[in-house]
């Protein structure tokens, strides 16, 4: 399932640049790492980590979960470089 999400993110990244690195940490379900304009399920150190359930990640990427609301409600937690997280919003928006 995460590989399908990573593939979808990769399609969205085509033709766009993303500076920095970011990890969606879905706990036992695994991770999705965005680095060097690539989306992968291989875990690595990143500038920013977003801890989120796989279900909420799907909602976030499809526009059904507002990032600010998600943080306020505790549905996602951001650690590390907040600037990288902000760039993600511009990339997905």
Image (cartoon, helix red, strand yellow):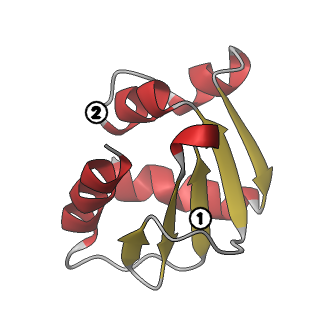
Contact check, label 2 and label 1, Cβ < 8 Å: no
Picture coordinates of residue 85 (x, y %)?
61, 55
Name the residue at the bottom extreme. 36
Q: Nearer the viewer, residue 77 or 43?
A: 43
Name the residue at the front extreme. 28
Quadrant of residue 86 in the image?
A: bottom right
Rendered position, 70 above or below 87? above
Question: How much space separates mark 2 and mark 1, taking CA atoms?
Answer: 18 Å
Picture coordinates of residue 66 (x, y %)?
48, 25
Q: Sequence-wise, which precedes: disc 2 or disc 1?
A: 1
Q: Nearer the viewer, residue 69 or 42?
A: 42
Disc 2 secondary structure class: loop
**Quarter holding the N terminus?**
top left
Picture coordinates of residue 93 (x, y %)?
33, 47
| Picture residue at 72% right of the left edge, 71% below the top | 47
| Picture residue at 37% right of the left edge, 26% below the top | 59
Quadrant of residue 51 in the image?
A: top right
The reply, left or right, for residue 85 in relation to residue 61 is right
Q: Check disc 2 and report the residue beneath it.
A: 62
Crowding at mark 2 (Cα within 10 Å: few <14, some 14-19, many 20+): few
| Picture residue at 37% right of the left edge, 80% below the top | 17
| Picture residue at 21% right of the left edge, 75% below the top | 14
Number of numbered labels in the structure image: 2
Rendered position, 39 above or below 53? below
Picture coordinates of residue 68 (x, y %)?
61, 28
Q: Check disc 1 and report the residue beneath it.
A: 22
Quadrant of residue 45 in the image?
A: bottom right
């Amino acid at each position: 399932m995460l590989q399908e999400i990573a593939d979808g993110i990769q399609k969205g990244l085509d033709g766009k640049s993303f500076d920095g690195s970011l990890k969606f940490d879905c706990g036992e379900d695994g991770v999705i790492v965005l680095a060097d304009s690539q989306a992968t399920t291989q875990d690595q150190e990143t500038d920013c980590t977003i801890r989120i359930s796989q279900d909420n990640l799907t909602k976030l990427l499809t526009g059904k979960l507002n990032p600010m609301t998600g943080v306020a409600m505790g549905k996602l937690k951001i650690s590390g470089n907040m600037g990288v997280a902000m760039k993600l919003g511009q990339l997905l928006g």
